[in-house]
């Protein structure tokens, strides 16, 4: 890439720039604090000026910047080219070979840190003997990953194969991912909250032949039937002609033999194996395989605006370079400094991939994994009131805590006195991710967890904006450098040329809403949508381009604005996906599940603002009168419940609609498109429908919908 003019640098933020209204929390500016005051030896980036210098350089001379940054990784063969950009295809660090497991584990052992803690795990149940805690050193993690890798090889897994992982938050999940990386196989992790249909769809799309799972997992005191869901998925895949060759099962629940012995073939010839008979005991002699920089590290499915989830492709070197750098700078990670990093996300989401596993271990800082829910159980085994997170922080002396706004709003609801009962003095940096954080939740976090005052002090909050597709943080404060404002994710990460633009690609003036774009490639960017080139281009690269050159820009599908200081404020998705409790869901996925119920003729799903979850799901459904009649059913509460449960069964509990409303018809445009904007207003109870309804087919439909309120 050639050097270009750096983008304008933001002015030093000040409380009185722009349209300042001192009554608004979001107009407050919280300056960074000296590292020593927070118990750090130093900040990686210690001032706004230094950030600006580095950021300007990172986007004007990306080759030079990333060549240097890539020195933080260990290479088997050095790369020859930093970046080749044939929009929308980027290749990073071509010519190089490396291994992700080696960079996260083996190199630390080789450097003499085999006895240092790599992973701290805590299970959800609390037994008579107290907490179930496991600590693994880098040496132990290496041993386990190598054994599991040997077992996978023995099962016929080869470089380039996709291994599906559907597991609870247990140490074997991290081991399984590292084992795949070790032999150059890609993993495709499916969140344990998804149902069997979601598994079979993803297994078949990825053409995956092996599934790693567990006999169950604990969540809120209940057992999640993971193996049963896998069994169902395997059976339905066989019916579709897709043979799953092997299923590897960790014993977590231990309820009997689960109906198989290792090596036994079950439905359709799929062989089942226990982890403890194979992966745990296979030979630890299995060195890390060198892979090409652009070899796929993993696939991770994310929701889009069609019913079918997209398999986002991430490759090895670029992803690792980006996650190790963003983890280090955003959380000020320092090895051997007594840090314990805790990200509360499930590994089944990208946040867990990048900041439970890869980015943290690559920096040789211990990462904490917790299996369960924040309110279960209380310390002595009683049903909890929501103190579990604070208890974990206090007991494990967590230094960096990374969670989601939906969790923070839940904590607010549970009361200020809960965290106040625990010693949170180990904390140094607080992170937020997954959805916009509202200024009130930011202030609560700052005050009650951060120990800050109304205008400053306390621990820095980093509100990190990014996506499955971006691999790592693309807009975030850096704790030693960036003054923060409640509700703003602030300024771009190093290497990210971000802008808020209109459809024509013109940069929007301050405080005018626009589309969030990234104008240059970055190492952590997605390399494709698995098996779907067309979707890759149309979803991300088809909407925005450089008005001068016509070069496509990356569009994240988020609306945003900048303020007078150049700070970025995310305004939410502009497509038909919604964030429910921080989880991305396509409205079409929920609609497809609804119309698969025999009573349903048509369905439309919208997000409604919700005080805790961010958004709640509201489903409008038209019924089949003939079905109701034949089955002696009515459009009643029982049917609403049944439909909500049907969605939970088809997609997963996270997709269960909060509200189901029956309608005689759905508002459509003359061309037959459902008018979701209108439904959003109806669902949110907006009194006067202000939107343009001139294209509406039959306005009486809307009147009826509103009258039909429960
Ligand atoms: C939203 C999660 C505002 C956004 C890492 C994005 C955010 C989507 C933030 C990606 C934030 C994530 N502020 N919005 N700090 N973080 N989002 O792929 O809409 O599960 O497009 O990745 O979450 O969700 P995903």
Image (tube, grey):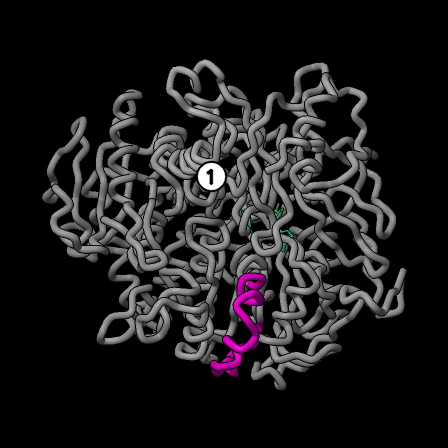
Q: Position of residue 7 (x, y in %)?
A: 80, 52
Using the image, determine if residue 493 lies above or below residue 600. Answer: below
Q: Residues within 10 Å of mark 1 (few under 14, many from 20)?
A: many
Based on the displayed image, in which of its 4 quarters is residue 132 positioned? bottom left
The residue sitting at 54% across, 51% down in the picture is 581
Asked whether 416 falls inside the magenta stretch, the response is yes
In the picture, measured across the screen, residue 475 lies left or right of residue 284, that is right
Q: Nearer the viewer, residue 526 or 378?
A: 378
Q: Quadrant of the C terminus?
A: top right
Q: Quadrant of the N terminus?
A: top right
Using the image, determine if residue 334 lies above or below residue 92. Answer: below
Q: Position of residue 562 (x, y in %)?
A: 80, 53
Residue designated by label 1: 301
Magenta-drawn segment: 408-429
Q: Nearer the viewer, residue 492 or 189?
A: 189
Q: Nearer the viewer, residue 535 or 390?
A: 390
Asked whether 36 falls inside the magenta stretch, the response is no
Dot 1: element: strand
Q: Does residue 81 appear in the picture of this structure?
A: no
In the picture, measured across the screen, residue 421 lies left or right of residue 479, that is left
Q: Position of residue 567 (x, y in %)?
A: 77, 58
The residue sitting at 55% across, 23% down in the picture is 622
Q: Does residue 681 appear in the picture of this structure?
A: yes
In the picture, measured across the screen, residue 685 lies left or right of residue 107, that is right
The residue sitting at 63% across, 65% down in the picture is 462
In the picture, measured across the screen, residue 205 lies left or right of residue 136, that is right
């Amino acid at each position: 890439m050639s050097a270009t003019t750096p983008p304008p640098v933001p002015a030093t933020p000040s409380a009185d720039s722009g349209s300042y209204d001192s009554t608004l929390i979001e107009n407050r500016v919280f300056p960074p604090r000296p590292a020593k005051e927070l118990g750090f030896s130093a900040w990686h980036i210690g001032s706004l000026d230094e950030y600006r210098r580095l950021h300007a350089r990172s986007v004007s001379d990306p080759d030079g910047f990333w060549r240097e940054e890539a020195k933080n990784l260990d290479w088997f063969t050095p790369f020859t080219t930093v970046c080749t950009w044939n929009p929308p295809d980027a290749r990073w660090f071509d010519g190089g070979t490396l291994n992700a497991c080696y960079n996260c584990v083996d190199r630390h052992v080789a450097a003499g840190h085999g006895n240092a803690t790599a992973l701290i795990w805590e299970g959800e149940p609390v037994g008579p003997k107290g907490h179930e805690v496991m600590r693994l050193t880098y040496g132990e993690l290496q041993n386990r990953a190598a054994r599991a890798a040997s077992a996978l090889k023995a099962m016929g897994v080869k470089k380039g194969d996709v291994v599906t992982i559907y597991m609870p938050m247990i140490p074997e999940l991290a081991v399984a991912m590292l084992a795949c990386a070790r032999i150059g196989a890609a993993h495709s992790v499916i969140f344990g909250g998804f149902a069997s249909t979601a598994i079979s769809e993803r297994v078949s799309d990825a053409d995956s032949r092996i599934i790693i799972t567990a006999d169950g997992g604990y969540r809120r005191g209940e057992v999640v039937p993971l193996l049963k869901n896998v069994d169902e998925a395997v059976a339905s895949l066989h019916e579709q002609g897709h043979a799953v060759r092997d299923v590897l099962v960790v014993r977590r629940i231990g309820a009997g033999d689960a109906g198989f012995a290792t090596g036994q073939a079950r439905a359709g010839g799929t062989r089942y194996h226990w982890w403890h008979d194979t992966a745990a005991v296979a030979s630890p002699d299995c060195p890390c395989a060198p892979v090409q920089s652009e070899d796929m590290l993993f696939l991770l499915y994310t929701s889009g605006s069609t019913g079918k989830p997209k398999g986002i492709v991430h490759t090895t070197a670029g992803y690792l370079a980006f996650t190790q750098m963003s983890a280090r700078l955003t959380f000020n990670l320092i090895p051997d400094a007594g840090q314990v990093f805790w990200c509360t996300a499930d590994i089944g989401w990208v946040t867990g991939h990048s900041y439970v596993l890869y980015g943290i271990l690559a920096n040789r800082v211990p990462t904490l994994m917790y299996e369960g829910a924040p309110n279960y159980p209380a310390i002595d085994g009683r049903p909890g009131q929501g103190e579990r997170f604070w208890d974990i922080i206090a007991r494990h002396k967590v230094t960096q805590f990374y969670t989601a706004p939906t969790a923070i709003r839940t904590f607010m609801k549970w009361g200020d006195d809960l965290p106040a009962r625990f010693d949170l003095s180990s904390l140094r940096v607080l992170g937020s991710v997954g959805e916009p954080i509202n200024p009130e939740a930011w202030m609560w976090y700052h005050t009650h967890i951060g120990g800050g005052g109304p205008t400053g002090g306390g621990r820095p909050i980093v509100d990190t904006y990014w996506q499955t597709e971006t691999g790592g943080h693309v807009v975030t404060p850096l704790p030693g450098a960036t003054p923060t404002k409640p509700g703003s994710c602030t300024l771009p990460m190093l290497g990210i040329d971000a802008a808020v633009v209109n459809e024509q690609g013109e940069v929007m003036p301050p405080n005018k809403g626009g589309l969030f774009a990234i104008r240059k490639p970055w190492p952590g960017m997605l390399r494709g949508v698995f098996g779907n080139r067309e979707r890759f281009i149309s979803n991300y690269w088809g909407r925005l381009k450089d008005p001068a050159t016509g070069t496509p820009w990356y569009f994240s599908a988020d609306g945003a604005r900048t303020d007078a200081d150049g700070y970025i404020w995310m305004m939410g998705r502009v497509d038909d996906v919604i964030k429910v409790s921080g989880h991305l869901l396509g409205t079409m996925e929920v609609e497809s599940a609804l119309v698969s119920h025999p009573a349903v003729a048509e369905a439309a799903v919208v997000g409604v603002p919700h005080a805790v979850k961010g958004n709640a799901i509201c489903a409008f459904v038209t019924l089949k009168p003939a079905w109701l009649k034949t089955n002696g059913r009515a459009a009643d509460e029982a049917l609403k419940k049944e439909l909500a449960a049907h969605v939970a069964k088809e997609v997963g509990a996270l997709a269960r609609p909060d509200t189901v409303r029956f309608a005689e018809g759905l508002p459509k445009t003359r061309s037959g498109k459902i008018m979701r904007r209108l439904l959003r207003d109806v669902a949110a109870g907006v009194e006067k429908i202000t939107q343009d309804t001139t294209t509406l087919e039959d306005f009486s439909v809307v009147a009826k919908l509103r009258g039909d309120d429960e």
